[in-house]
Amino acid sequence: MSLHLSREKDIVIVEIEGQLIVSNRQELKQRVLDEAEGGARKILVDFARTGYIDSAGLGVLVSLAKRLRELGGDIRLANLNDDLQTLFELTKLDTLFQIADSRERALETF
Amino acid sequence: MARHGTLDLRIPSDVQQIEPVVAAVVRRCAELSLDARQLALNLPVALTEALSNAILRGNGEDGAKEVRVRVWITDLEVIVEVEDQGSGFDLEACTEDPTTPENLEREDGRGLFLMRALMDRVERFTGSGNVVRLTLRRPGHAA
């Protein structure tokens, strides 16, 4: 997995390339927490180039959402393909996250 | 029932081994024309969960212990067995539903749920070690 972080106004965009699984979830968690520590409150995770996600990867997203919301911010998701959308629906995490079908739409929701 | 492909891999108890093993299994199944959605979602996610359980819970990340992965691919189904060398853990003890409102915001507890949701059958038994067997039926393939 590789992460690419960029900024659009006050929104930090995190692109995940590859798989988000137990062996690399900590990297995502630390990078986002570092951003939050630096004052970021709006995080957009873009899954356009993400492969599959396991339960550990889903767990990290849940953990980050809780932390961001405690800080008065939020984490939102964009560009889930059909398989990833199914994963979020199976686990009902689609009810916990605001999910947009494009990065542009996700940016508009913040 | 014709068997078209098998794999037999042994890996050390290191989570960094998960991704390459999953890729090898998916590649073999792709060569035998497994359904695209099963290749992209069901198989990789369920196998990642089984390997993660075996490495972290079964073998306790003990570098001296191995995980064995065996795969059989037939016209009808894909069977994957993940065997660890630990003292065993009770799959049935992990049946809490992660989708209930009280569990939805938990960071853990979705692994077995996903295996069961994405596979047609999940079994655990004791062979020479502790084995989790995942069975995935292939849509549209006649016997």
Image: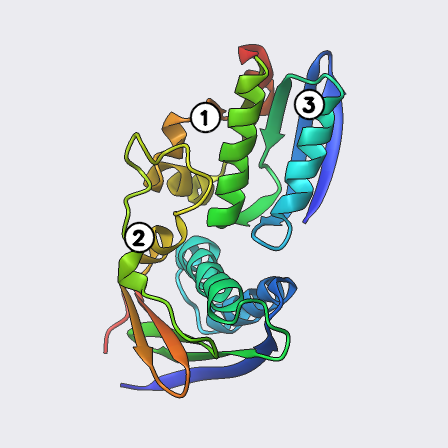
Is the same chain shared between marks 3 and 2?
Answer: no
Q: Is residue A24 above or below residue B87?
A: above
Give the Cα distance between marks 1 and 2. Answer: 21 Å
Mark 1 packing: few (<14 Cα in 10 Å), some, or many (20+)? Answer: some
Q: Which residue is mark 1?
A: A97
Residue B139 appears anywhere in the view: no
Q: Quadrant of residue B99?
A: top left
The x and y percentages for residue B118 are: 34, 55
The x and y percentages for residue B73 are: 39, 78
Q: Amino acid at mark 3?
A: Ala
Chain under callout 1: A
User: Is residue B34 toward the left or the right of residue B13 in the image?
Assistant: left
Name which residue lies at 30% across and 77% down: B125
Name which residue lies at 61% across and 24% down: A44
Whether label 1 touches label 2, CB < 8 Å: no
Q: Amino acid at mark 2?
A: Ala
Q: Amino acid at mark 1?
A: Phe
Is the same chain shared between marks 1 and 2?
Answer: no
| The residue positioned farthest toward the left in the image shown | B143
Give the Cα distance between marks 3 and 1. Answer: 18 Å
Residue B72 marker: none
Q: Which residue is mark 3?
A: A36
Mark 3 packing: few (<14 Cα in 10 Å), some, or many (20+)? Answer: some
The x and y percentages for residue B37 are: 41, 54
Near-viewer residue (A9 or A63): A63
Name which residue lies at 74% across and 36% down: A4
Q: Nearer the viewer, mark 3 or mark 2?
A: 3
Give the Cα distance between marks 3 and 2. Answer: 34 Å
Residue B117 marker: 2
Near-viewer residue (B44 or A29): A29
